Amino acid sequence: MNMFRYEYTTTFLLLFLLCPMVLSLLSQNQTNTMINLYNLLNHSDWNPSKNSNPCSWKGVTCDTTNSSVINIVLHGSALSSQSLPVLCKIETLQHLDVSNNHLNSIPDGFLSACGKIENLKLLNFSGNVLSGFLPTFHGFGRLESLDMSFNRLSGTIGLQLDGLVSLKFLNLGYNNFSGNLPTNLGRSMVLEQLVLSNNNFEGTIPDQILSYKNLTVIDFMANQLSGSIPLNIGKLSKLGTLSLSSNKLGGKIPMSLLNIKTLVRFAAYKNHFTGVVPLGITKFLSYLDLSYNNLSESIPEGLLSPPQILFVDLSYNKLIGHVPANISTSLVRLRLGGNSLTGEVPSGICEAIRDNQLTYMELDNNQLKGLIPPGLGSCKKLALLNLAENQLTGALPPELGNLSHLQVLQLQTNKLNSTIPIQISQLQKLSTLNLSYNSFDGPIPSDMPVNLTFLDLQGNNLNGSIPSSIGNLRNLLDVQLGENQLSGDIPQMPSSLQIALNLSSNHFSGIIPSSFGDLASLEILDLSNNNFSGPIPPSLTKMSALTQLQLSNNNLSGFLPSFAPYVNVDIEGNNVKNRTNVPVNNSPRKKGNSVVAAVLIAIAAAIFVVGMVTLLVVLISRHYCKVTDERVQSNEIENLDIPQVIQSNLSTPNGIHRSNIDLSKAMEAVAEPSNVTLKTKFSTYYKAVMPSGSIYFAKKLNWCDKIFPVSSVDKFGKELDALAKLNNSNVMIPLGYIVSTNNAYVLYEFVSNGSLFDVLHGSMENSLDWASRYSIAVGVAQGLSFLHGFASGPILLLDLSSKSIMLKSLKEPLVGDIEHYKVIDPSKSTGSFSAVAGSVGYIPPEYAYTMRVTVAGNVYSFGVILLELLTGKSAVTEGTELVKWVLRNSRNQDHILDPNVSRTSQAVRNQMLAILEIALVCVSTSPDARPKMKTVLRMLLNAR
């Protein structure tokens, strides 16, 4: 018996020693405090009835004996300000993270109580809605890390932080602080990381900052700082990152920076720095960005050669001289565009270097001459090569065909000649090929890279016919072949075309191919200035996405087919009549021309009736999701019969909508082509009138083979049901859905004003004053902030553009198409990812390489929308993306702003200039440099 007790006791002691997590418990006081917190928060991951040990609750960390709570993470937990003081009852707390909640203030009770916790080392309040002044922190003697970023704090900073004697990390970025940069940041001067980016700090960089000898990170990006960098900044011998971008700093780059051996990253783009690029500045750096300044003279010869250098961006300065020939094998990105560099492209950049890492090389917008060196073919990892807008001559070297990783090749606006080498077809990953406005002659190569998305060969001397193999390029979105000498038969074009097919100013003759009618996703067809004859094929009316049809200056005759009223048709210089035998007005048709519209509707109805019998035969053979993104069927084929419903639901909790909506009426509406009111990249909107007289949108999702397999219809429904519970005045909330045997439909409230694109660039052009544009910008930002801040994770926009912004009124926007990210899988696309995730002009540059939709990518797209509102121009303007056009003209801001609006008053112009700065931050090349939408919204409101 005693032996048994001995063994039992020994076993128990061993279990106690080996399994403290099982047997150790918190004190009753801490247990009660944690249960108290649970009752206050109703935290979904905390449940005392199922798990009585708080140490195992999500976000809670205890010490090794489970006797004390030391860390609490309540990230995104709907925590209220009133609950904060309860946390301070845990006297053993070391780390407290309450980021991404809706805290609007920090109670005095929290500051006084938590300030007494002896070992509290970390406080994270980032991503809340804290407003007012920065509180004063009394106590907190061992606090090492304080993060208050991404809030709405304002005012100046004086002595509020001076008592934090142990402070090493301070992040106050993305707030609305003003005044001078703070200099009292802990009396012990032990600060290591100082982040004050994206505020409204002004004045100079104070010398007192240099007293913090332990600083490793300084981030003052996106403020209003002026003056120069302190000459003795080299005293900060431990500094690793210095970010001063997007300020108003000037003067010369101080030579003392060269003495900091630990400095890895120096970014100071978008300032007013002058003078030369210091010789030796890259001796220790890995990352250097001085783009968009006023630096002059030549680039030091040794700048690109240090073995550790990875990234150099000196674009858009006033640099002259040659491109340095000695380039490090470690260099990944080289950007020198927008200068006045002369000489030749260095021939030995990659020759005979097996491990060269160069991935992006941009030397565009300079004055480089000579040949493109064949040695570039040795840059095996090159993904982007941009030598556009120089004075390069000679032939395109066939050695470029060795660049097996090349995705973008831009050589437009040079003086290149000879034929396009057949080796171009070897570039299997190439998505963008721009050789426009050179002097290439001969035929278009019979084989082109299979993954091409954008092909631009316009403005050359190419002759012969278009190769039939172009029809095999199933990723093509945009084809520009205008202003050449092309002739012969036009082959079947790939049905993937969406943006434009430009064959203008060539020598094509004969009748217009009826096969163009198969290009159901194409928006612009330009056949002007050729020798086409005969009638305009009625099949062109099947191009359901068509917005512009350019047929001017041909030999066309006969009658004008009945195009949809939103299609701009230009037939000047032809002999085309309408059905009343009256010559058609040669100017582009307007939506307001009611007589012409009525005639066209009558013609459309006649054609519709005549074609019904034939088309019904085709309808019988259709199967579930048979229509693909490459070939969306014509409206007549899609919509003649009412689709068979396999699942539907009214998801909205709104009783009025539930009583008004008749799902069968919605299905009748989508069976009638005349109900189409809007078409975007992924959707077709139908006007559905209910028996009550209420009007709704029934939106068809065009890419149904990308949405869901038959087995996942339930998942589709659950996603829509969840979205229907959202509530935001600037977001289009789905009301219900219908899944049929051949497509999926989503129901919304009807919006009569159409899309922002229609109002900005369509028939209502110039109707938006600045007050309306500003209100739209704020409304869209509010909607996106709501979606990005969703508790269960951000709701992203797969295709954020002015076409996906609907207008309740000319001041009230709605962010639409929110379900696409949830139900469309871009990875299933046969095209490139960037072709799926966004519209041209709105796609952030990193999408081509990261292959994923992100919050930062949405911010970029919003920045483009801001630029549209500011300039009045579309996302692709004057042959280039609007972002590039704006950056190219950034030194002449009056040229950028829409003169119809900016000249209204000086106050309007000043506000537009302030918002232009916000837009430029949003479209930063680096995703990390873009603010969150919550911050963008605050910046917009502050610009009022």
Image: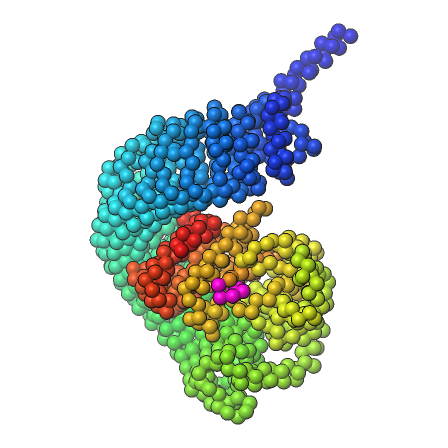
Q: Horizontal placement of 91 versus 872: left or right?
A: right
Q: Which residues are magenta?
A: 803-811
Residue 344 visible somewhere in the drawing: no
Q: The N terminus appears in which quarter of the rendering?
A: top right
Measuring 38% from the left and 33% from the top, which residue is drawn there?
Answer: 161
Measuring 44% from the left and 70% from the top, which residue is drawn there?
Answer: 767
Q: Horizontal placement of 343 versus 699: left or right?
A: left
Q: Could you tell me residue 135's position as x and y percent?
A: 43, 36
Q: The C terminus appears in which quarter of the rendering?
A: bottom left
Depicted 600 relative to depicted 520: above or below: below
Residue with the most extreme bottom position: 581
Q: Quadrant of residue 541?
A: bottom right
Front-lying residue, 168 or 828? 168
Residue with the most extreme top position: 2
Q: Could you tell me residue 573's position as x and y percent?
A: 42, 87
Q: Could you tell me residue 64's position as x and y percent?
A: 57, 23
Residue 204 visible somewhere in the drawing: yes
**Residue 804 colored in magenta in the image:** yes
Front-lying residue, 686 or 507? 686
Front-lying residue, 492 or 659? 659
Depicted 567 relative to depicted 363: above or below: below
Residue with the most extreme front position: 108
Measuring 39% from the left and 76% from the top, which residue is drawn there?
Answer: 484
Q: Horizontal placement of 441 versus 753: left or right?
A: left
Depicted 485 relative to depicted 728: above or below: below
Front-lying residue, 812 or 610? 812
**Residue 663 colored in magenta in the image:** no
Which colour scheme appears in the figure?
rainbow
